[in-house]
Image (spheres, helix red, strand yellow):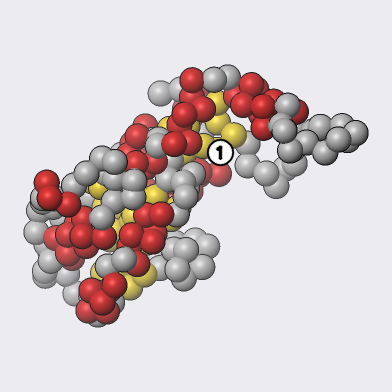
Amino acid sequence: MTEEIASHEMPSTPPDPALSTARRGKINVAMIGLCGCWGCTLSFLDMDERIVPLLARITIHRSSLTDIKRITQRCEIGFIEGGVANEENIETLRHFRNNCDVLISVGACAVWGGVPAMRNVFELKDCLSEAYINSPTAIPGAEPVIPSHPDIPRLTTKVYPCHEVVKMDHFIPGCPPDADAIFTVLDDLINGRPVALPRSVNHFD
């Protein structure tokens, strides 16, 4: 583990109880997008009419759909889209790990870093220089500046897949994954079945 991740206090991994049909009431679900394109969230919505009966079984808490900023109660399932590219992503991912029983990497960016991780072959300073100093969109005559402000999360030296920061319980690959894959995993979990992702809906492109 790199120093920039290790420098953050590592919380203890919470228990990971198996979900079962004996669980009373609705199952709490949280979702978040880290460094990605939000395409995996669209795949969730691509479950279309299947979402309606799901909502009788689950309550969606923190997510881009509800605009709830923090997890305020324990969630049985957490979906993570996107990789880890800055310090805020690290804090958010650890918040989910501490507050979700089962944590799932959704999509190529969360599983292995995806397109954002292409910067890992370069030094961070070179990436920033290319983006802000030598950018073809720089304003002529203006002095180029690399943005720096306390409100802007500090970039990590590389982009990490989620499992390099916290323990992840399941992985749904794809860019983006099929809606069928997300539905299959969610349906297995809320019905207390072992997660079984068929090859027909499991892809890596």
User: Would you say 158 lies left or right of 133 here?
Assistant: left
At a point 73% along the width and 26% down the height, the residue shown is: 134
> Mark 1: which amino acid?
Glu
Q: How many numbered circles does the render carry?
A: 1
Q: Is residue 180 visible?
A: yes
Question: Which corner quadrant holds the C terminus?
Answer: top left
Look at the image and tell me whether residue 29 can be seen.
no
Q: Quadrant of residue 115?
A: top left
Looking at the image, residue 183 lies above or below residue 95 = below
Assign the N terminus to one quadrant of the image: top left
Comparing 42 with 84, the one in front is: 42
Mark 1 crowdedness (10 Å alpha carbons): few <14, some 14-19, many ≥20:
some
According to the picture, the residue beneath numbered tag 1 turns out to be: 87
Of residue 111 and residue 13, the one placed in the foreground of this image is 111
The residue drawn where x is 37% and y is 54% is: 40
Q: Position of residue 99 (x, y in %)?
A: 37, 55
Q: Position of residue 116 (x, y in %)?
A: 48, 36
* Residue at x 11% of width, y 70% of height: 22
Say left or right for 53 vs 156: left
